[in-house]
Each structure stands twice: as C-alpha cells, then as structure tokens.
C-alpha cells in the first residue's frame, strides 16, 4: 500500500520503527511510544497525524527562520528545478543561482568575508574549514601549523571531521573520533561551571585557556580556533561579556585563524545578521547552514576572508561536494535572504519581538525549578535546578528533569529541547507576540507538571 498522511498513525509508527534509523535516538525511545508523525506546518505551527497543533519552539532544528508554509520558497524551488535542476560547479562551470547567492552572502557578511565555498550542510562546511585552514598555512610555507583548537561541549556537526572539531564526549566515544590534531579547551559556561567567580572573571579565565593551549602546543603549530559565537546544541550557552573580546585579542596576538561557526547564530537568530556581530568578533571564516535556506533546502557554506580565499584559491584545493552550490538550494536560499531582508525580520527580532520574548522568557525564573534564564535574540535556555542558591544540578537519577519537562512540553504541544538540565528554545524568527505568550504559558504549565 502507498503510505500517506491518511495512513493510521500506529501503522506509520510501526513501519518507521522497523525501517527508519533515527539520528541521535535509542530504539527504546521509539518502541515505547512511536515517533510523533509530523504532517504539515504553517507559520510556527506543526500538525501531527493525530490532529494536534504543536507550537514549534525550536524552528525545526534551529533552522526554519522565516517560518513554515512560505509559497515564495516553493516557487523559487519549482522555477529552478524546471530551468536547471542540477549542474555542478566543479571544473570551470558555474550557474546563476550559485553566483547570485555568493554575491549576496559577500554583501551580508561583515568585513572582507567575501568568498563562498558551498557545501550541503553545516557538517560538510566544517569539514571544508578543517582542511582549508591547514591548507592555508601549508601554502603560506608553514606546513607544521596544523592544530585546530576547539571547545568541550561545542557542536560542529556529525561527520568525522566536524564531529572531531566538536567537543561532545558522547560522540567521541563512538566510531573513531576525534581524529588527531584537534585540541580542546573548556566552555565559558558560567552557570554550570563558574563556581564563586563573577561571570566577568570566569569569562576571562576561560578565554585565557586558549592562550595557555596555544603556548602549550606552540603558536607556530596552531592553525585555527573554532567556536560558535553562542553555543547552541551545548545548551544555548551565552558567554560572559568578557569572553569574546579576550578571545579576539588572543587570536590576533598569536596569528591564529578564527572560525566562527554561525550555523545556528547566523541569519537573524541573535537579532543581528550574524552572531559574530552580536559578539563583536572578526572571524576569518564563517560556517553557515540552517537559516541560510530556513531549512527548505539542505545547504551550507564556508565564507572566507580575502586573504584566506586568495591563498587557498591559488592552489588547487582538492575538495568539493557534488552538491556544492546546488542550484535549487542556492535559489531557495537567495529567496529566503530576500524575505529576511524585505520583511525586516532581523530588525524586528532585535527591536521588537526579541525584547518581548526576553522579558517573558526571563519571567520563567519565578518558577521554583528554574535557576536562570538566558536569551539573546531568539535563542534561549533555562537551567533547571533543585537549589537555585547553589546552582546544583539534579542528581544523576533525577537528572532527567530536563527530559521530564521536555516530555511534558511535548504533551502540551510545545516543542522545546533539553540538554542535560537546560531547556532550550529557538523559535521561528517570525513568531508573533501572542504566540510568544502561548509558548511561555505552555512552558510554565509543563514545568509545573514536572515539579
Ligand atoms: N555547527 C553548528 C553550530 C550546529 O548547530 C550544527 C547542527 O546543529 C552543525 C554545525 C552541523 O550542521 P548539519 O547538521 O547541517 O550538518
């Protein structure tokens, strides 16, 4: 039989469990209840196969920035598929969507980040970056400058290269990661790890770990530092204000390339076009994906500054993906950027809906389970704790507080994610104030039920 959204939910779930391997999922999670089958979506609302309307507080996976149901993006894809569904950009060919999107990204990206190397995803773009920075230094006559420094609990993707760049210990434990040549420093997570220090002291201390690591490895051996302006998958960790200026000083002083992974923080998520602008940093390379196409097509890219592009461009960089600069993905991304710009979505997040969400979101700290609420633009998280004064985490057995709350949210038709005892939101940037109210009401109700 042909499956459709009219197929009974239980049947879809059984076939799903039998044949579909889900990322980051233990089979028991699916066997117990079956996956929730999402059937359609509009604005910030998802529909499931049981007829529920669910508020998507995560914009899919931090990516549906312009919201669901955008006919303009459908039309852009259909037009492009008719005209030229595929052609590659290897070996001296190009096409209009890849050219136009590169031009637009060069305009939008700060400073002299003027050159775009396309990928199919954020992971692929970070794999590109890893090889690119090493190739850059080799071409500059410093082939020993190969170490890349990252941070524990960073997320840079799931391929072997990107997963190694990431600092997720659970991922490193499986399948041969990390690869050699990558070093890690601690994250600037004040609430969880700052102890008695002020956030300012702690921010400086964690930034200076980069300096110590560079000196330990030898500055002549270090190619780059990679970081998310605001860690996303690690729990929406907004660093203390002292952190990024000190990191910038260190990378400048030691001549290390700075890679800003903007896969989540790009395209308005922080109320700026890029998280680097929100944090006041000047990366040599930015990784983008997700919000670049609002998730309507899979696409990622590395955006390079003039100097790096010139050096790597003048050797044959033996790297590329069949779908580097996929015409349909580029056409959709270009249209998505037009929507973000023409509808003033980034400015609205910065000036209007972002501040409103911040006020409402921070009110969650009145709840007995919530120790802190931190948010920038439209990415935020709350820390759940049994003891606000000591900022204690839940004990291991009860450490499922985040999980319980997420389950309650799910039942209350709100998608929030949990990372340990942090609960995350990252809604579509077009969320209206009344929908923000609904989000906060459902979050509060779920916390009450978990309490
Ligand atoms: N970098 C960051 C900061 C991310 O959050 C993600 C995905 O969540 C990635 C890279 C990987 O992107 P993708 O899943 O498109 O490969």
Image (spheres, rainbow, N blue to C red):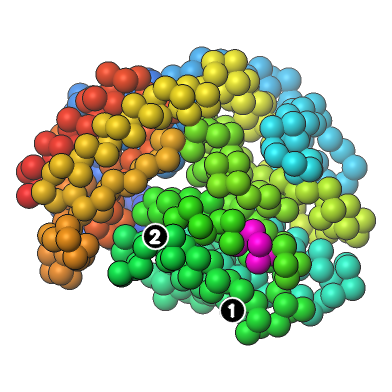
Disc 1 element: helix
Find residue 157 and name its label.
none
From which residue to which does the magenta span run?
Answer: 247-251
Mark 2 residue crowding within 10 angstroms, few (<14) / some (14–19) / many (20+) = many
In percent of width and height, residue 78 lies at 61, 19
Q: Which quadrant, please, contains the N terminus? A: top left
Q: Which residue occupies 31% across, 64% down? A: 192
- In the image, 324: left or right of 370? right
Q: Which residue occupies 61% across, 26% down? A: 337
Q: Which residue occupies 75% across, 35% down? A: 106
Find residue 199 and name its label.
2
In percent of width and height, residue 247 lies at 60, 62
| 191 is within the stretch colored magenta | no
- Residue 21, compared with residue 266, is above or below; it is below
Circle 1 sits on which residue?
A: 212
Q: Quadrant of residue 93?
A: top right
Question: Please, which residue is most extreme toward the right here?
Answer: 314
Q: Is residue 315 visible?
A: yes
Q: Quadrant of residue 178?
A: bottom right
């Amino acid at each position: 039989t042909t499956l459709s959204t009219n197929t009974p939910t239980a049947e879809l779930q059984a076939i799903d469990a039998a044949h579909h391997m889900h990322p980051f999922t233990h089979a028991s999670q699916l066997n117990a209840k079956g996956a929730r089958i999402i059937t359609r979506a509009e604005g910030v609302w998802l529909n499931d196969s049981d007829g529920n309307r669910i508020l998507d507080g995560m914009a899919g996976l931090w990516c549906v920035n312009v919201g669901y149901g955008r006919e303009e993006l459908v039309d852009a894809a259909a037009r492009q598929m008719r005209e030229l569904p595929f052609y590659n950009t290897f070996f001296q060919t190009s096409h209009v969507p890849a050219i136009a999107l590169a031009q637009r990204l060069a305009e939008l990206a700060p400073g002299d980040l003027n050159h775009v190397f396309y990928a199919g995803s954020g992971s692929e773009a970070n794999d590109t970056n890893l090889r690119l920075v090493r190739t850059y230094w080799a071409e500059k006559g410093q082939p020993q400058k190969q170490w890349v420094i990252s941070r524990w609990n960073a997320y840079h993707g799931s391929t072997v290269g990107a997963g190694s760049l990431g600092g997720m210990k659970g991922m490193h434990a499986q399948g041969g990661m990390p690869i050699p040549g990558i070093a890690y420093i601690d994250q600037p997570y004040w609430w969880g790890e700052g102890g008695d220090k002020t956030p300012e002291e702690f921010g400086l201390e964690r930034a200076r770990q980069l300096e110590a690591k560079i000196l330990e490895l030898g500055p002549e051996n270090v190619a780059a530092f990679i970081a998310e302006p605001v860690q996303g998958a690690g729990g929406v960790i907004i660093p203390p204000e002292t952190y990024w200026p000190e990191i910038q000083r260190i990378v400048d002083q030691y001549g290390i390339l700075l890679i800003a992974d903007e896969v989540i923080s790009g395209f308005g998520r922080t109320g700026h076009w890029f998280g680097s602008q929100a944090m006041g940093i000047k990366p040599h390379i930015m990784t983008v994906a997700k919000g670049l196409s609002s998730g309507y097509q899979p696409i990622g890219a590395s955006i390079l500054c003039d100097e790096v592009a010139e050096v790597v461009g003048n050797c044959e960089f033996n790297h590329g993906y069949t779908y580097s600069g996929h015409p349909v993905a580029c056409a959709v991304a270009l249209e998505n950027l037009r929507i973000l710009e023409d509808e003033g979505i980034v400015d609205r997040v910065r000036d209007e809906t972002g501040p409103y969400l911040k006020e409402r979101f921070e009110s969650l700290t009145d709840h007995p389970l919530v120790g802190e609420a931190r948010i920038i633009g439209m990415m935020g998280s709350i820390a759940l704790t049994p003891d606000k004064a000591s900022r204690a985490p839940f004990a291991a057995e009860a450490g499922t507080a985040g999980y319980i709350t997420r389950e309650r949210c799910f039942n209350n038709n709100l998608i929030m994610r949990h990372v340990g005892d942090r609960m995350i939101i990252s809604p579509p940037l077009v969320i209206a104030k009344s929908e923000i109210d609904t989000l906060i009401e459902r979050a509060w109700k779920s916390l009450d039920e978990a309490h």
